[in-house]
Image: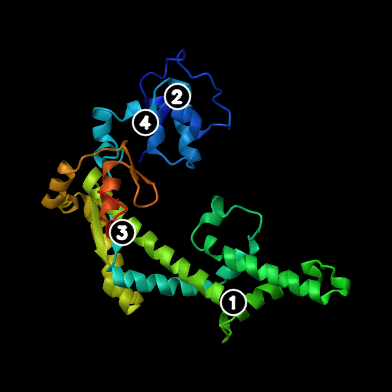
Amino acid sequence: MDEICSSDLPGNEQTDHRPDFQVDSCNYSYDLLKELDPVAANRIHPDNHRKINQYLSLCARSGVLPSKLYQGKAAENWGQVDNSRYSCCFVCVDAAMSVLDQYVEHRVDCMIDAGLLDEVYNIYNPNTNYTLGLRQAIGVREFENFLRVYFSNSRDDETSDSPGGTPLKLSTRMDDKLLKENIGGILNSSSDKPQKILLEEAIDKVKANTRRLVRRQKRRLNQLQTLFGWNINYVDATDSISSKSDEFWAMQVVGTAVKIIRSFLNEDDRTECALDGENKTIMNTVQRDLWTQYICKACGDRVLRGAYEWEQHKQGHGHRKRISRLRKSQSFSP
C-alpha cells in the first residue's frame, strides 16, 4: 500500500539534485535518512531496513523527499482503494473473539504435536540475536530461554559423565534425534522440574502472542475501512469454527464468500460492497495524520506514528491501566 515506484514520480528526470551517496550501496542507515528527511524518518521504525533503503533510493534517484509525496492531494489519496489501478473485492473471514482465542489455543497445540519443537530446535543458536530475522517470529523467540537452559544442562551432563570432566561433543553422546525426543519427554512428564516449567511457559507465551496478533490484525482491518475506505466484506465463521464441521464451513463460509465474489465480478448490486453510512462518517471525520510522531511516556517511551495509531493506543487496555497506576502513585500528570 505504501510502496513507492520512483519511476512514476515527478522529478525523476532531475539528476542534479541527488544526495552525495551511492545508490547501489548497501550501507544505507537510519541516521542518514534522518539527516535527509527527518519527517519521513519519524514515520518508520529504525529497524525497517527495507523501507529505509527504499526511501534513500528514492532520494538518490529523483531528488524527491519521501515526506513531500504525502502532502496535499497525494496525502488525500494515499492508501485509498479508489486510487488503486485495480478494481478490488476484499473478503475477510472473521469470528467472535472468544472463538478465535479458543482456536488459537487449539492451533498452537496442534503445531506442537506436528513438530514445532523440532523446527525450533533445528534453528537454535545460543550466540544469535533473537530480536532479528526469523528468530523474532512468533513460535520461535518464546523458546529461547528454555533451549538455553536445556542445552546448558545437557552439556553439564556430558561433562560429568566424561573421563576427567572433559566435555565431549554432543553428537558423540547424544544425537539430535535423541535430544528432540527428550524435549517431548519433558513436555509429557508429570514432574514439575524447572525445564518443564520453562517449556510450558514458552508455549503459553506463543499462545498469548498469537492472540495479541489476532487483535492487532483486526484493528488494522478496521483502520483500512475507516481511514482508507476499503470495502471489506466480512464473512462470519463463528458457528463454523465452533462446530468443527467441514460441511458447515463449506456452506456458511466458502459459499458466502463465493457469492460475494460472483456478485462483484458480475457487477450485481455493487452497493453491497460499499461502506455503510456510519463508516463513511467516521472516515470523513478521522484526521489522516500519517507523519506526526507521538511518544507515550507512560508506556516506556513507546513511539506511535500517526494520529490514528496514537488514538488507538490511548484506548488500549494496557495504556489505560498504566495511566491509572501512575496517577495513583502521583508520579504522572496528564
Instruction: Identify the amino acid type marked 2.
Output: Cys
Q: Along the polypeptide, which appears first: circle 3 or circle 4?
A: 4
295 vs 90: above or below: above
250 vs 215: above or below: below
What's the residue at 30%, 58% (across, down)? 92
Can you identify the residue that label 1 sits on?
194
Q: Nearer the viewer, residue 52 or 334?
A: 334
Indicate which label's residue lies in the foreground, 1 or 4.
1
Can you identify the residue that label 4 sits on?
39
What's the residue at 48%, 75% (across, down)? 109
Query: Helix, strand, or loop for circle 2?
Result: helix
Q: Nearer the viewer, residue 127 or 273?
A: 127
Q: Which mark is residue 9?
A: none
Instruction: Identify the amino acid type marked 1.
Output: Pro
Cβ atoms at labels 2 and 4 below 8 Å apart: no
How far across and down, in percent of the image, does residue 198 sit? 55, 72
Cβ atoms at labels 1 and 2 below 8 Å apart: no
How far across and down, in percent of the image, does residue 157 sit? 75, 75
Indicate which label's residue lies in the foreground, 1 or 3.
3
How far apart are the two marked residues, 1 and 2, measured between alpha carbons?
Answer: 54 Å
